[in-house]
Amino acid sequence: MKRVWNTHSADETREVGIQLGRVLRAGDVVLLHGDLGAGKTTFTQGLAQGLGVQGRVTSPTFIVAREHASRGNGPALVHVDAYRIRDDQDMTTLDLERSQDDAVTVVEWGEGKAEGLSRQRLEVSLTDQGEGSWEDVDAGTRVITFLPHGDRWNDVFDKESS
Ligand code: ADP
Ligand code: MG
């Protein structure tokens, strides 16, 4: 996979998520960085599709984590929204470790909070480049950058930066 993507719609961002979801396996940790509306949940929807899990992925507003079981034999998806977790609160004290080894864990708003979950984590930054239209809120430009940590990702991403 390329490390840097430019997308021009929510569907294109979902498509990048699908490609990543297809190569993920149990134990993987993905942290999503980006402002409100950057596309973290949209990306996770594609990731869930590529992984092949059940249920609709939404922003887990009132709960911190939602688990999606696999449709087949693959790993489950644990989708975490760390927005309401305090900076000084250790994420590893959440009741996530039960499933971290047999699930794929995706964390929105995890910057500065969730790095301790895995040294092999994949960080994904999503940036809104503006150029959106109020007539079509699903069409705007986003830059998606993969920042792999650890050798787990050596075979997943191209050596070049784009
Ligand atoms: P976050 O979870 O980061 O707060 P969401 O995924 O919930 O963001 O929302 C992103 C919003 O931006 C959606 O309304 C989506 O339709 C819109 N959007 C427009 N262009 C894009 C794009 N290229 N990629 C992702 N979302 C986009
Ligand atoms: Mg979100």
Image: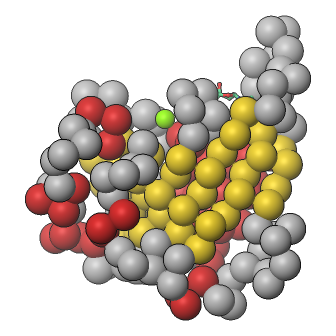
Residue 37 visible to an observer of this rendering: yes
Q: Quadrant of residue 137?
A: top right
How many tags in the picture?
Answer: 0
Left or right placement of residue 74 versus residue 155 in this view: left
Q: Does residue 117 lie above or below 38 as drawn? A: below
Question: Residue visible at 68% across and 90% down?
Answer: 155
Residue 86 spot, x, y in % from top left:
22, 38
Q: Quadrant of the C terminus?
A: bottom right
Left or right placement of residue 45 versus residue 112 in this view: right
Residue 136 spot, x, y in % from top left:
82, 16
Q: Quadrant of the N terminus?
A: bottom right
Q: Nearer the viewer, residue 65 or 29?
A: 29
Question: Residue visible at 30% across and 67% down?
Answer: 116
Q: Quadrant of residue 131?
A: top right
Left or right placement of residue 59 versus residue 6 in this view: left
Residue 52 visible to an observer of this rendering: no
